[in-house]
Amino acid sequence: MRILITGDSFAADWQKKYPGQIGWPNLLSDLHAVTNLAQAGCSEYRIYKQIISSDLDQFDFIIVSHTSPYRIYTEYHPNRVNDVLHRYCDLLYSDIEELAKINPEYLSAVEYFKKFFSLEYADFCHKLILDKINALLKNRQAIHLSHIVQTANSINFSDLYKTHRGLINHYNDEGNQIIYKKIIEELSK
């Protein structure tokens, strides 16, 4: 089966940074022809761009791992350009807040998040992008995953994320196995 994986760090290939570490996408690629476009730290808009950059007719199944509505798309993350896993990371308040502690250059971004960033607007935009993604995949075999923020028509792994945290795809080995088995189950339906 030819499978396209799109999404955030919950679906990215962490072996790029941690060779030998096996996450659920790597397990899946042992059985199927997998093209993995997922990128650590990406926004829902970047996930949308992953999907539209692909010839979807080349795939039998598409897996989308959705992300937080509070990631802000940026052409490149100024502090992650040399990180092989997070090279195309978008901005998230908690990340910027940590960066500001060691580099005052990020204080203005922290102030933006504190004073001007609207959660309501971010949620609204996130829903619009989800609607666009769903429209693109309407007549295709697709699996939608959520790990932190529940999205409509997705397999919700938020409870698993709370109990099986680890290094690879944010899960321990058991957590990655559970996700892998659930995806295999969905693929065989």
Image (cartoon, helix red, strand yellow):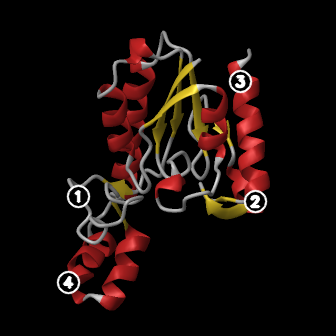
Label 3 crowd (10 A; few <14 / some 14-19 / many >=20): few
Locate residue 132 relative to residue 153 in the image: left or right. Answer: left
Looking at the picture, tell me which residue is in the foreground, 97 or 90: 90
Residue depicted at 42% across the width and 14% down the height: 58
Query: Considering depth in this image, is 8 or 134 the residue closer to the camera?
Result: 8
- As measured in the structure, the alpha-carbon distance from the residue carrying label 3 to the one carrying label 2 is 21 Å
Q: Amino acid at mark 3?
A: Glu
Give how far across and how far down residue 21 sits, in percent: 63, 57
**Between marks 1 and 3, how big is the CA–CA gap?**
34 Å
Q: Are marks 1 and 4 in contact (CB under 8 Å)?
A: no
Q: Closer to the observer: label 4 or label 2?
A: 2
Q: What is the CA distance from the residue labelled 2 to the residue labelled 1?
A: 31 Å
Residue picked out by circle 4: 105
Say which mark, if any, is on residue 164: 2
Give how far across and how far down residue 115 sits, in percent: 28, 73
| Furthest residue toward front | 20
- Distance from label 4 to label 2 (Cα)? 35 Å
Name which residue type carries label 4.
Glu
**Residue shown at 56% from the left, 50% from the top:** 10
Under circle 2, the secondary element is loop
Picture quarter containing residue 94? Answer: bottom left
Pointer 2 local density, CA inside 10 Å: few below 14, some 14–19, many at least 20 = some
Residue 186's disc is 3
* Figure check: 99 above or below 25: below
Identify residue type, mark 1: Tyr
**Which mark is drawn over residue 76?**
1
Q: Position of residue 49 (x, y in %)?
A: 30, 35
- Of pointers 2 and 1, the one earlier in the residue sequence: 1
- Would you say 98 lies left or right of 189 here? left
Looking at the image, is mark 3 or mark 2 earlier in the sequence?
Answer: 2
